[in-house]
């Protein structure tokens, strides 16, 4: 029987979904993995922090409007003090992404590793801006830096290569990795205007108030950058990805494609070349012979070309905070069971 | 640096493809995994056997018409003596499948485990007829029994759940797992008769001389049985899978489906129910909204429903002996690196 102390940095949709998943899986983790856990700390930006070395009551944390009320120990002044004092074995870093710098998540993860914790994040920023630094630090400290949820939520992508495709080399990939633009294109095919499709995506919570990060291909470019950096082993910044968004795809383009039996998709693609990497995000017409053709709404797909298999595709239908939370849980279980 | 002694039982298309892959990856295995290997034995039914504790020359083995000529040690009388004397750490069991009993592969694997070897097979027979027995024996002996290549060749299916989806429970799956019937249906859509499509599948080497194992759904039922047995943890024999082949799908059915924008596919499906398992293989009409719609020819797909993710699909395009060989290599690397 092993006991793990967990700390949650960030307690928004994903952190709360993880908490509920941990509660739901508690008995199963005990039975299948002989594993128990306690949450020794939760930190938020606007709803306080709580630390309890004997373990916080997750149900009370989920119900509390301010976490300060359930803390048994003095409240840390800031995030860094929280990390140093939370006393956990595993830190879940789920602060909002910063596309330009990856901060403050990178510093949080460094501090967590230096404090002897394994660190897990759903935040793409640290992966594209500090993957090698964080991996090396983790290696040096005998700890893990995992981030399965950063691309395609809970679907195994990074762990697919790390755990199931040993001895393979990734040569290229293509896919649909941004759900907002895919939802917008899907709704436009059904006759909705671009503006209404954007508004719908905002209403269901997948697009931001400022949707340009999705529409102009930034989110997709960051995911391309993360996949190239980690799976191809070649650092590539989001700005190095040739990037075209979907603003030029109007109703005429949509209906002309339809009449040809095709569909516009915002395709992410990268391939190794003799001189390095060619990576791009751009709208492409795809036909029914492509596995991307049937990928609608928030569903995502990636197709990998390796030196050992034919094309291998992974499709995840309708992800959400629960599936992101599962990606975090799978990282946790992967690092403690291997 | 670790050294592994490997033995190959069966040296047909798959065994030979594995040998070529091992030669191709030799330097990479050394660099990435600090791992060397030698082949201490190869046994065939009709082309002799060879044993050499110092390692056989794989290139000579691939070129030899009778392996006896390259053996340094006395030739074993039979397969069982070969297993006892080959002196390997890892046994690759690639004898032909026996759908009814799983023999003689099961006995070969038992003997291998009892001799202290890890055992790997591409043979579905032992998985559906002796999974629990072989897994328990392996566990008792501190060894592994792996079989990634038995369903969807080299694509990670068993290792996907074992290595990347910890804490998940498989509730149901659907897929296209028999390439011969999928090729026949694809050719019939292009106007070919059933008989010509069968002949074509035989010509390219995917259908047997007696193609009834594919056409009547036996091969698909065995794969359903393997997935249920291993991934759902419930032993299910192929005969317990409700089974309908593709003999009733004639040109009229094909063209009526086409006019409705649909396609006939031989669908494998199983789901957990309150009372056990419902499992079947049967032709189904699928529309373009299904990820199965675009799966043509020898390509295969499986879509998993778990309690933690949305639907997760894996598609493998155009497998062959090389990809089956990679499944064996990935089993080997998984068992020595974890």
Image: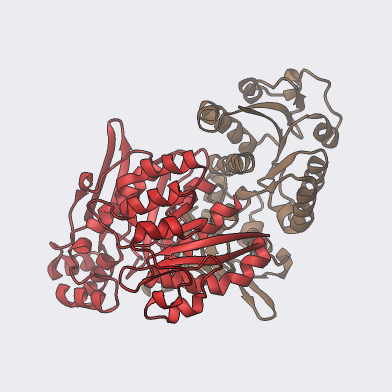
Chain colours: A red, B brown
The image quadrant of residue A136 is top left
Q: Measuring from the top left, give residue B44's x and y in whole percent.
A: 74, 33
The image quadrant of residue B51 is top right
Tell me: residue A279, above or below residue A337.
above
Tell me: residue A335, above or below residue B171.
above
Tell me: residue A260, above or below residue B49.
below
Q: Residue at x 63, y 22 (%)?
A: B63
Residue B191 visible somewhere in the drawing:
no
Q: Measuring from the top left, give residue A321's x and y in whole percent.
A: 40, 70
**Which residue appears farthest toward the front when viewing the image?**
A74
A244 left or right of B211 in image: left
Marker count (numbered): 0
Tell me: residue A218, above or below residue A184.
above
Q: Residue at x 22, y 52 (%)?
A: A100
A268 left or right of B184 in image: left
Q: Measuring from the top left, give residue A137's x and y in whole percent.
A: 42, 41
Name the quarter where the N terminus of chain B is drawn: top right
The image quadrant of residue A91 is bottom left
Q: Which of the two residues, B135 or B51, is positioned nearer the viewer here? A: B135
Q: Measuring from the top left, give residue B151's x and y in whole percent.
A: 60, 54
B29 left or right of B290 in image: right
Q: Residue at x 77, y 17 (%)?
A: B72
Q: Which of the two residues, B171 or A134, is positioned nearer the viewer here? A: A134
Name the quarter where the C terminus of chain B is drawn: top right
Q: Which of the two residues, B334 or B286, is positioned nearer the viewer here? A: B334
Residue B6 visible somewhere in the drawing:
yes
């Amino acid at each position: 029987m092993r006991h793990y102390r967990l700390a949650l940095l960030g307690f928004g949709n994903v952190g709360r979904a993880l908490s509920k998943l941990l509660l739901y899986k508690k008995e199963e983790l005990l039975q299948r993995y002989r594993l128990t856990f306690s949450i020794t700390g939760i930190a938020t930006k606007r709803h306080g922090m709580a630390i309890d070395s004997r373990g916080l009551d997750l149900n009370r944390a989920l119900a509390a409007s301010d976490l300060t009320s359930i803390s048994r120990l003095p409240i840390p002044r800031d995030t860094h003090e929280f990390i140093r004092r939370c006393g956990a074995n595993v830190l879940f870093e789920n602060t909002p992404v910063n596309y330009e710098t990856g901060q403050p998540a990178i510093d949080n993860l460094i501090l967590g590793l230096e404090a002897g914790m394994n660190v897990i994040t759903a935040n793409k920023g640290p992966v594209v801006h500090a993957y090698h630094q964080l991996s090396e630090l983790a290696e040096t400290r005998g700890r893990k830096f995992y981030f399965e949820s950063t691309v395609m939520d809970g679907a195994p992508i990074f762990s697919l290569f790390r755990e199931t495709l040993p001895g393979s080399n990734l040569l290229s990939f293509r896919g649909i990795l941004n759900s907002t633009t895919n939802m917008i294109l899907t709704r436009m095919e059904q006759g909705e205007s671009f503006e209404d499709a954007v508004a719908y995506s905002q209403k269901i919570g997948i697009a931001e108030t400022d949707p340009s990060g999705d529409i102009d291909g930034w989110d997709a470019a960051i995911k391309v950058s993360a996949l190239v950096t980690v799976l191809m082993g070649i650092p590539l910044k989001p700005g190095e990805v040739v990037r075209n968004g979907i603003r030029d795809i109007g109703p005429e383009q949509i209906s002309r494609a339809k009449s040809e039996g095709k569909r516009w998709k915002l395709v992410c693609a990268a391939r190794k070349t003799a001189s390095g990497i060619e990576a791009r995000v751009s709208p492409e017409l795809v036909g029914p012979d492509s596995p991307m053709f049937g990928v609608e709404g928030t569903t995502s797909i990636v197709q990998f070309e390796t030196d050992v298999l034919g094309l291998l595709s992974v499709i995840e239908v309708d992800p959400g905070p629960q599936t992101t939370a599962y990606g975090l849980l799978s990282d946790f279980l992967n690092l403690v069971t291997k």
